[in-house]
Amino acid sequence: MNASGVGGPGGPLGDDFESNCPEETESGVPLPPWEAAAASVTLGFLVLATVLGNALVILSVFTYRPLRIVQNFFIVSLAVADLAVALLVMPFNVAYLLLGKWVFGIHLCKLWLTCDVLCCTASILNLCAIALDRYWAITDPINYAQKRTLKRVLATIAFVWIFSGAISSPPLAGWNDWPEELEPGTPCQLTRRQGYVIYSSLGSFFLPLLLMSLVYLEIFLATRKRLRERARQSRLGAVASTRHRCTDDDPEESVSSETNHNERSTPRSQAKPSLIEDGPTTMTVTLGGATSTTTAIAPSTTVYQFIEERQRISLSKERRAARTLGVIMGVFVVCWLPFFLMYVIVPFCSSCCPTERMVYFITWLGYVNSALNPLIYTIFNLDYRRAFRRLLHIR
């Protein structure tokens, strides 16, 4: 979203607000040459990285078979929103920053601001959809696996974009303080109508932030509970493996069980464990040419080693998932909270006059989230890394 400019002719913050900001903060001036060069390189790289990262995500899902699963369409929708930010919003903001003024006219200004709100809101709401999808997949995996159909996923994505349109379109219908024409020095900025500011900030950020915080807290608690249960089971399994181990140390007794199904064998008896699996161990016993089968409730040492290894891998994955949740929320809050605080406070505070450099920095910090989303949601996934390498012809 764009909040460039803090003032302008004719009450730029609308009839609801009168700014006391000094005159010099009301219009931008071109950046000094060295700042313009640094900004061009930095922001140009950011735009390119955002386009490339999100385009790779979209192509990966549609060209790499292991990624063609319904839940990944949420990732595609997120990538489309972030790609739109990079193509439709960022380039105009770069020009606005370098030139120090808006030179594209009032109609393109309105369209740009509407696209800005639409795409950024859709990006944030897609993060909410992904959070809810993960929550239901973790807390109700069996039932949700049946409910997570392509039709339902596409309906959720459609709702995200329709709701984003409902947030971004009211200024076009008249809920704005935009002038009829942009005079020299008049900023192209989001409307400062206090009612719309409250409406859009709640729908675009604060309610999604609350929802994501609650959902990821529940996911974190559920994951921690599972980690503790698995750790407890692992400790119990280690104890059980020492107390209930099938032995053939005594040449006169090849199979021993903690149940009432003990069988004796001759010195020629042989005991072999079945295929290693999670469950009771089946033992084949040969008695003087005759073969019988006994199921031992206690698994062998090899079985327990296999089970413990699986539990160790599972615990490691769940710990990584919990850390990833922290990264997701941390990046989202760091990128967007400063902007929305400024967006909400300035229209209600006549003495709050952020400098243009601060406004641009906070605005671009929000855009950075669109560049980081492909990394956060895909770089930790082996299938995405393989798909990226294939698309980039990297071995």
Image (cartoon, rainbow, N blue to C red):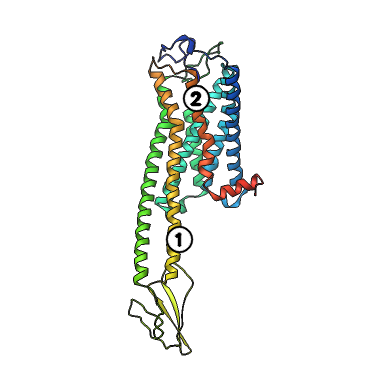
Q: Is residue 217 visible?
A: yes
x and y percentages locating residue 139 in the rendered image: 39, 51
For the residue carrying disc 1, how many other residues have a C-alpha within 10 Å: few (<14), some (14-19), or many (20+)?
few
Q: Position of residue 111 (x, y in %)?
A: 56, 23
**Res 109 quadrant in image:** top right
| Cα gap from disc 2 to disc 1, whole angstroms | 47 Å
Vertical placement of residue 76 versus 44, above or below: below
**Label 2 sits on residue:** 361
Q: Pick whichever, 327 or 127, lies toward us.
A: 327
Residue at 36% x, 77% y: name it.
Answer: 257
Left or right of 50: which side holds 9? left
Residue at image x 56%, y 37%? 80
Is residue 105 among the parts visible in the rendering?
Answer: no
Question: Closer to the camera, 330 or 370?
Answer: 330
Q: Which residue is mark 1?
A: 310
Amino acid identity at mark 2: Phe
